[in-house]
Image (cartoon, helix red, strand yellow):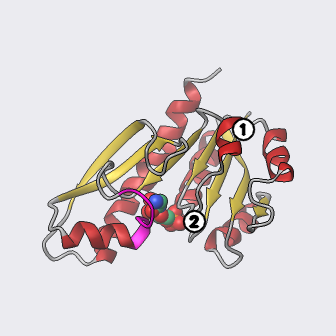
Amino acid sequence: MKNIIIFASGAGSNAQAIIDHFKANGKARVSLIVCNKPQAGVIGIAERERIPFLLVDKSTYGQAMMLEQMADLKPSLIVLAGFLWKIPENIIAAFRGKIINIHPALLPNYGGKGMYGRHVHEAVIAKKEKQSGITIHQVDEVYDNGATITQAYCEVLPTDAPNDLAARIHKLEHFYYPRTIEFLLDDMK
Ligand code: GAR
């Protein structure tokens, strides 16, 4: 059975979609959820789903104990799902090529530091874009920079508030992220 580690900081709707997808098809399991926010919704999801979670803070993040706990699981993929801290270089080096992220816009536009969640949708609407979407990409040392794996598009309506666009983007994410992960896992030994 292949192991997936999810990193998340927020409500965890993507984490839930991934958990549900692999519970249904049995090809992999989410073995650990790493979170940096004690009040995040994703912790409630981990508890309900009986998935171990690791709450990190500035003093434990990227330290040897965390790396060991991750390495023990021999993860096939580390999946960032709304995780807002930069991934330390030692984690990237230890799991090179196995870390992926989802971004709620069409990179390279609307990416980089400070561009997350609602801020992205506000910027897209302020620029009167007609189209937005999602980008699933490899993670390297530079923010929102790794090779693109897939993108999916949606329209932006003139009447959209950031919440409307966020809801449309979340729908795309919940459909494409679990399926892209499955596709990547199928390609691995
Ligand atoms: C998602 O829309 C994800 O793309 C975004 O945070 C949201 C998390 O939602 N990630 C970023 O903005 C990263 N730059 P969720 O907690 O409901 O899965």
Q: Secondary structure at mark 1?
A: loop
User: Residue shown at 68%/67% (left/top)?
Assistant: 36
Query: Looking at the rendering, in which quadrant would you find the C terminus?
Result: top right
Query: Looking at the rendering, in which quadrant would you find the N terminus?
Result: top right
Residue 91 % position (x, y): 69, 44
Q: Is residue 184 left or right of residue 149?
A: right
**Badge 2 local density, few (<14 within 10 Å), some, or many (20+)?**
many
Residue 69 % position (x, y): 84, 48
Give the amino acid at mark 2: Gly
- Can residue 26 be seen at all in this image of the molecule? no
| Mark 2: C-beta under 8 Å from nearest atom of ligand 1 | yes
Residue 75 % position (x, y): 72, 38
User: Residue shown at 84%/49% (left/top)?
Assistant: 64
Give the amino acid at mark 1: Pro
Give the CA distance from mark 1 to mark 2: 20 Å
Q: Is residue 32 magenta?
A: no
Residue 29 % position (x, y): 70, 44
Residue 15 versus residue 21 in the image, above or below: below
Q: Nearer the viewer, residue 145 or 69?
A: 145
Q: Is residue 69 left or right of residue 103?
A: right
Q: Secondary structure at mark 2?
A: loop
Q: Is residue 113 left or right of residue 24?
A: left
**Badge 1 local density, few (<14 within 10 Å), some, or many (20+)?**
some
The residue that mark 2 highlights is 12
Magenta stretch, main secondary structure, is: loop
Magenta residues span 111-118
Say which label, 1 or 2, has the lower sequence index. 2
| Mark 1: C-beta under 8 Å from nearest atom of ligand 1 | no
The residue that mark 1 highlights is 75
Tag of residue 7: none
Q: Is residue 117 magenta?
A: yes
Q: Nearer the viewer, residue 189 or 60?
A: 60
